[in-house]
Image: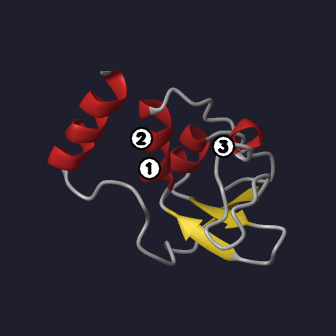
Amino acid sequence: MGANTRLDSLSDLIKHKANVKLICPCGRVHIFDAERLNRYALLRSWNTQLEALRYRVRCTECQGRGVRLKATPEPPTLADPFPRTEVEWKRLHRRLRG
């Protein structure tokens, strides 16, 4: 990444092969795969800008919102809560769209 690279949205992170680090005020840190988080956000019709997305995600420990989201080259740290297979993604899509 160059010095002038702006990573403002999930699509920017995907383009630069970065993941998303979520840092909660309670001190808990998780790293999610940016592609899977982006797909989930688009299915939910969420804004994928990092500043807007920080109020949508919630800490699993304290249930608090307002986590900080940062770009990181590190691999995901835990099994994410998103669907694992294409069939599960399609099932989620049908459920959300009615």
**Disc 3 designates what residue?**
56
Q: Nearer the viewer, residue 81 or 47?
A: 81
Amino acid type of the residue tagged 2 in the rendering:
Arg
Q: Which residue occupies 51% across, 26% down?
A: 45
Amino acid type of the residue tagged 3 in the rendering:
Arg
Q: Give x and y (percent) for residue 96.
A: 36, 30
Who comes first in sequence, dot 3 or dot 1? 1
Query: Helix or strand or loop: what does disc 3 sit on?
Result: loop
**Disc 1 designates what residue?**
35
38 sits to left or right of 49:
left
C-alpha separation, residue under disc 3 versus residue under disc 2: 14 Å
23 sits to left or right of 95:
right
Q: Residues within 10 Å of mark 2 (few under 14, many from 20)?
A: some
Question: Which of pointers 1 and 2 indicates the residue nearer the eye?
Answer: 2
Amino acid type of the residue tagged 1 in the rendering:
Glu
**Disc 2 designates what residue?**
39
Q: Is the residue under label 2 in contact with that under label 1 (CB below 8 Å)?
A: yes
Q: Which residue occupies 67% across, 64% down?
A: 59
Q: Give x and y (percent) for residue 66.
A: 80, 52
Q: Is residue 93 above or below residue 61?
A: above
In the rendered view of the protein, which quadrant contains the N terminus?
Answer: bottom right
Question: Which of pointers 3 and 1 indicates the residue nearer the eye?
Answer: 3
Who comes first in sequence, dot 3 or dot 2? 2
